[in-house]
Amino acid sequence: MNIKTSDGGWNPYLAGALVGVLAVVSVILTTNIMGKTNFLGASTTFVRAAGFLESSVAVSHVDQNEYFKKEKVKIDWQFMLVLGILIGAFLSSMSDKSFKLEAVPPTWAERFGASVPLRAFWAFAGGVVAMIGARLADGCPSGHGLSGLMQLSLSGFAALAFFFGTGVLVANLVYRRRAS
Amino acid sequence: MNEQTLGLLTGIAFGFLLQKGRVLRFDKQVGAMLLKDMTILKFMLSAIIVGMIGIYFLNDIGFIELKHKTMNVGAVVIGGALFGLGWAVMGFCPGTSIGAIGEGRWHAIWAVLGMITGAAIFAELYPFFKQTVLAWLDWGKVSLADVTSLNHWVLIVALTAVYIGLFVFFEKKKL
């Protein structure tokens, strides 16, 4: 087995295991430094981002919203974690020259063509539905998948099964070419 | 160090590893859902094996307390299915969409804008969900060890064996 993949990336088992180490180190550091244990997650940050954007036009509406009150619209540890992902991915892609400006994903273009508006519409629509689902389920593949399965949480196993099970069904309907 | 700096540094390391593992790509995510390319599952399950051993060790020595998300049956089933539907069409999950922008795949911005909009819509619908789906059946914050009455280390060993079995299968089938 190779340490590097053909395109200069790292073996996914190695990179994944290092994320496991990072998850444990992060649990230790948040417990020590912040006095509370935080697990890796991402989707709550989208709620806070929505809260900030809405606040710029309708402060009182956000202040009175029960869900924004519950999740608290603030720049917290996870918000900065999500920003960090952007920076880390940029640094990594520059370090091995895999950074590439891409307007439409190759697999999508193969099936539906290179139209930017078409891709933009479906990515946006998919994003709306996915995030409503993630907030209802209270987590995404990071919070439920990684952090949930690491803790043997029942909700993590169930959520990941539904994420992936539905994903497999829908992807096969959407991306497989009809045999004709 | 304040919590924001810690979060940022952790995120940079996380994003770096996600990119090195090549799991930020639309093609990898859809490839997994088409059962053609299991890179993201290899990556996730490797992280989970290492993480569960470390986290349960920290829990056993009393350094941390676990934070299970609640097993609200309707919410996890309906929310999970909605997420899967959106994930397949969008080709990203919340964390990877941000990372994909970092490696130049700027089309992920549409997914991010959609997800922020989805979060705003959910905030408006929350009172409705609270009275319906979220009120149906809640099994609480439970772990697999609670529901099976097995020792967590027995489960960790068994699950590690299952995950490694999957790796062997993936490699054999060249997935």
Image (tube, coloured by chain):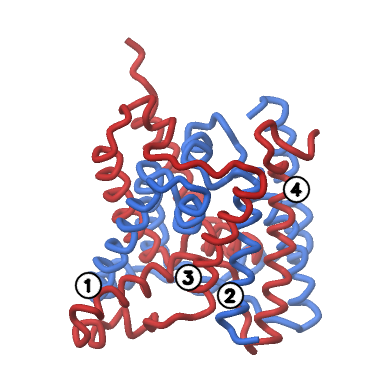
Of tags 3 and 2, the one toward the viewer is 2
1 or 2: mark nearer the eye:
2
Residue A64 percent coordinates (x, y): 23, 87
Position of residue B6 measured from the top left corner of the image (x, y, whole percent):
62, 78
Is the residue under label 1 in contact with that under label 4 (CB below 8 Å)?
A: no
Give the residue pinned by disc 4: A14
Label 4 amino acid? Leu
Q: Splitting the image into 4 quarters, where does residue A146 fall?
A: bottom right
Q: Judging from the image, what secondary structure is the residue with disc 3 in?
A: loop
Mark nearer the N terminus (1 vs 2) = 2
- The location of residue A112, given as percent across then percent down, is 31, 28
Q: Nearer the viewer, residue B62 or B89?
A: B89
Give the Cα separation between the discs numbered 3 and 4.
36 Å
Q: Quadrant of the C terminus of chain B?
A: top right
Q: Nearer the viewer, mark 4 or mark 1?
A: 4
Nearest to N terminus: mark 3 or mark 2? 2
**What residue does disc 1 label?**
B124
Residue labelled with disc 3: B139
How far from the left and from the top, in percent, is residue A27?
A: 68, 75
| Numbered label attached to residue B7 | 2
Which residue is pictured at 74% across the width and 63% down the height?
A21
Give the Cα distance between marks 1 and 2: 28 Å
Give the secondary structure at mark 1. Answer: helix
Which chain is rendered red in the image? A
Label 1 is placed on what type of residue?
Glu
Q: Nearer the viewer, residue B75 or B41?
A: B41
**Which of pointers 2 and 4 indicates the residue nearer the eye?**
2
Vertical placement of B81 versus B36: above or below? below
